[in-house]
Amino acid sequence: MGEILNINHLSKTFGTNVVLTDIDFNVNTGDVTTIIGASGSGKSTLLRCINLLETPTSGDVIFHGIKVADGGMSEEDYRAKVGMVFQSFNLFNNHTVLSNCMLGQIRVLKKSKAEAKEQAMKYLEKVGMAPYINAKPAQLSGGQKQRVAIARALAMDPEILLFDEPTSALDPEMVGEVLEVMKKLAHEGMTMLVVTHEMSFARDISSHVVFMADGKIEEEGSSSDIFSNPKSPRTKEFLTRFREDN
């Protein structure tokens, strides 16, 4: 498996507030890397830096050997290859489900409407949302909105998908339907980088787990390493409740 994404000594400060310190890890093609940790540990900020929604204070985000923040490739080209699924869906409320999944393809990938529609339908069917192509986001449940957001990201043919706590805005009964879609993608070999509080998903689906605390990587390793044999006392403490609940 080739290295697709390299996070190289990345740090981020907001004024005097240090949010991320010396974050360093790699994502290989086909990996499902989950980033876990308590709220406020810097997980979502890290993902936003990786997707250039925030500019790292120091360090590099390297995509196929190219330092993307240095202008090695345009943000638009980079984001077409590195898709993002947001906590709050970020759908266009004035567009239908189908249109939401076509717009990026037409504007960024310069596809024809016919090509974009065919690709959009392919992925809306994949996530079980084909019956809702004419609905507006306001007519959908949270779980349905997130499945549309995943289809929209997939329709861009990304090499890697970033997920920023994709189930945290959902009612509990809707979490499962989104996780099922993500599990299916993982089993099909989609490269994924997932910030999540869903520990069972992280344990069962991840090839690589990164545990963050206070803006730093406290520990990383395989799913079995982290969940069955954590080395750091902070990792052990964080996972104690999960083990008690399961």
Image: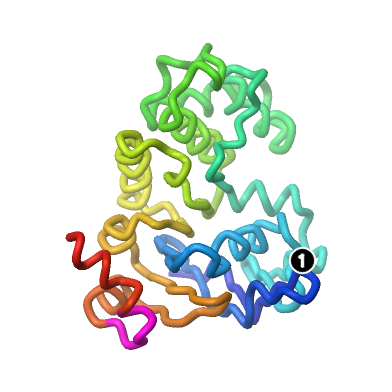
- Residue shown at 61% from the left, 26% from the top: 100
Whole-percent x, y for residue 231 in the image: 32, 87
Which span of residues is magenta-colored? 230-236
Where does the N terminus fall, quadrant-wise?
Answer: bottom left
Q: How many marks?
A: 1
Say which quarter of the image contains residue 8.
bottom right
Q: Nearer the viewer, residue 178 or 172?
A: 172
Q: Nearer the viewer, residue 212 or 133?
A: 212
Q: Is residue 127 above or below residue 130?
A: below
- SS at badge 1: helix
Q: Is residue 187 left or right of residue 123?
A: left
Instruction: Please rate how many residues cluster around mark 1, counting C-alpha atoms within 10 Å: few if below 14, some from 14 to 19, many from 20.
Output: many
Q: Is residue 1 above or below residue 141?
A: below
Residue at numbered disc 1:
69
Where does the C terminus fall, quadrant-wise?
Answer: bottom left
- Residue shown at 24% from the left, 82% from the top: 229
Q: Is residue 202 left or right of residue 97?
A: left
Q: Is residue 150 above or below residue 129?
A: below
Whole-percent x, y for residue 54 in the image: 73, 60
Say which quarter of the image contains residue 236.
bottom left
- Residue shown at 72% from the left, 32% from the top: 110
Whole-percent x, y for residue 39 in the image: 49, 63
Tell me how the rendering is colored. Answer: rainbow
Q: Amino acid at mark 1?
A: Ala
Whole-percent x, y for residue 142 in the image: 45, 30
- Residue shown at 56% from the left, 45% from the top: 86
Q: Is residue 190 left or right of residue 81?
A: left
Residue 185 lies in the magenta stretch: no
